[in-house]
Amino acid sequence: MVSRTSMFRSIVEHAHNSIKGKTSALKNIPNTTGSNYSKFDQLTNGQKIEVLSAIKSLKSYETNSKGVNERRKELFKKMSWTQQNLGEKVGYLQKLKSIDKAIDTNQKFIDDVANYAVSNYGVSQKDFELLENESSNSSGNNYRVIEALGHYTRDWTPNNISLELLPIFEYIASQLEMLIDYRQKKDTVLVFPGSGLGRLAYEFAKWDYGAVYSVENSGLMNLFVDFNYSNNTKPYTIHPYIHTNSDFYNTKSQLRTFEYKPIGETNKPESLHIAQKDFTQFEIPDRDKYKNVVIVSVFFLDTAENLFNYLDTIGKLAKPSGNVERGYWINAGPLKYGSAAQVELNADELAEARKNLGWVDAQSVYTIYDPLSLGNKTGLVGYLTDKESMWQGYYGLNLFTTSRKENKSYKDTTLG
Ligand SMILES: C[S@@+](CC[C@H](N)C(=O)[O-])C[C@H]1O[C@@H](n2cnc3c(N)ncnc32)[C@H](O)[C@@H]1O
């Protein structure tokens, strides 16, 4: 995944250096495999490594995050006594202590997620030997855990959809209403590639479509998603903003909490399917059951190393064939490429590429030029943006809705 919170990476890397040599114990991992082990056994080697390193990162969150705080305390001690006294007087050291406590609170939630994953996959200590030759390490991955915690404020605000997702939700909803005849809802499958913590897929799965696939390849995101739909619906407190000391007006703001209650197994919409895999390997199960395929990409396209591979996959999934009569693609996102992108198209180039690949645009909006399309004055939306911070990041979006040129007209089909 392309991180939009890369500032965390440097913080975490510093921490890693400061705690180098300390091996974080993999606590509470059983010595023998559990009853669900066949679920783990069926995974590909790559998927196994994703799951195991995600568990390891979760279990190491406290050590790694406190390592960052310890380093702060060490740096503080480099100042003169007078300066340290002043720092203490204004509450700086007390703040660092409160951060440690907040890390403990976060770890309680994270431990439950990790322990659920251990039992859900039935893994034991021995399985973690698979990670021995892996170059990535859990402290290096701590920024991903921190990022995932930030995603709760985006995805799992209680009751209402978050202000960050709302304009995107409304855009997708309006496009779906326009594209899909209401009599064919059950004949329609929606696919959300790179769905993160999955709120949008969940919301649209409540809308009577035949099936909704939430496709995500990050082991870490997937463990959080699994936990969301487990039979544990205990409430949790999360401190999403404690991992940096920069740009806060006060400590209260930094220590703000987020209350999260997992959705639970029984509340998972029946039509929602979680596909834990690389989108480019994804195929729609029983595709012939559907007449309409809609791909819904949100903040996803720019995560590609090879954008043309994503376009190929989207085309393959949506192009009418077999019983599928119509294919559509709705997109909402910026184009902020990662450091290894093999091609970095701007929105105009992407529109041209779509045309060349057999897509016919129904609509393409550049929100910066057309802010009202997002229902605000700026055409910008946040992504894990802390509205109380002195530093805030916002994105203009390219919203588009496009249809396969091969699509059958509704006139030529039996409805209802
Ligand atoms: C920028 S995040 C956006 C998440 C979500 N769509 C949202 O708007 O909150 C991109 C997501 O795509 C996932 N991702 C990246 N490449 C992927 C791939 N090839 N297959 C499936 N998921 C992928 C990442 O792990 C990450 O969760």
Image (cartoon, rainbow, N blue to C red):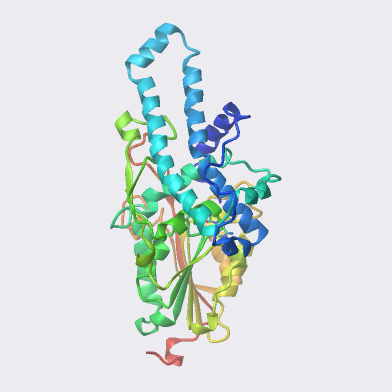
Q: Nearer the viewer, residue 356 or 26?
A: 26
Q: Which of 69 and 300 is in front in this view?
A: 69
Q: Is residue 50 above or below residue 292?
A: above
Left or right, 285 with reference to 390: right
Q: Nearer the viewer, residue 332 or 107?
A: 107
Residue pictured at 34% horizontal, 34% vertical:
255
Residue pushed farthest right? Answer: 133
Pinpoint residue 191: horizontal percent, then vertical percent.
Answer: 49, 69
Pinpoint residue 396: horizontal percent, then vertical percent.
Answer: 43, 52
User: How many numbered discs, if any?
Assistant: 0
Left or right, 276 with reference to 374: right
- Inspect this view and state whether residue 387 appears: yes
Residue pictured at 52% horizontal, 53% vertical:
118
Left or right, 205 with reference to 125: left
Pinpoint residue 247: horizontal percent, then vertical percent.
Answer: 39, 31
Q: In this view, does 330 lie above or below 94?
A: below
- Inspect this view and state whether residue 2 appears: no
Q: Which quarter of the rendered picture does the C terminus lie within? A: bottom left
Residue pushed farthest front? Answer: 32
Q: In this view, does 314 lie above or below 264?
A: below
Pinpoint residue 8: horizontal percent, then vertical percent.
Answer: 50, 37
Residue pictured at 56% horizontal, 51% vertical:
1
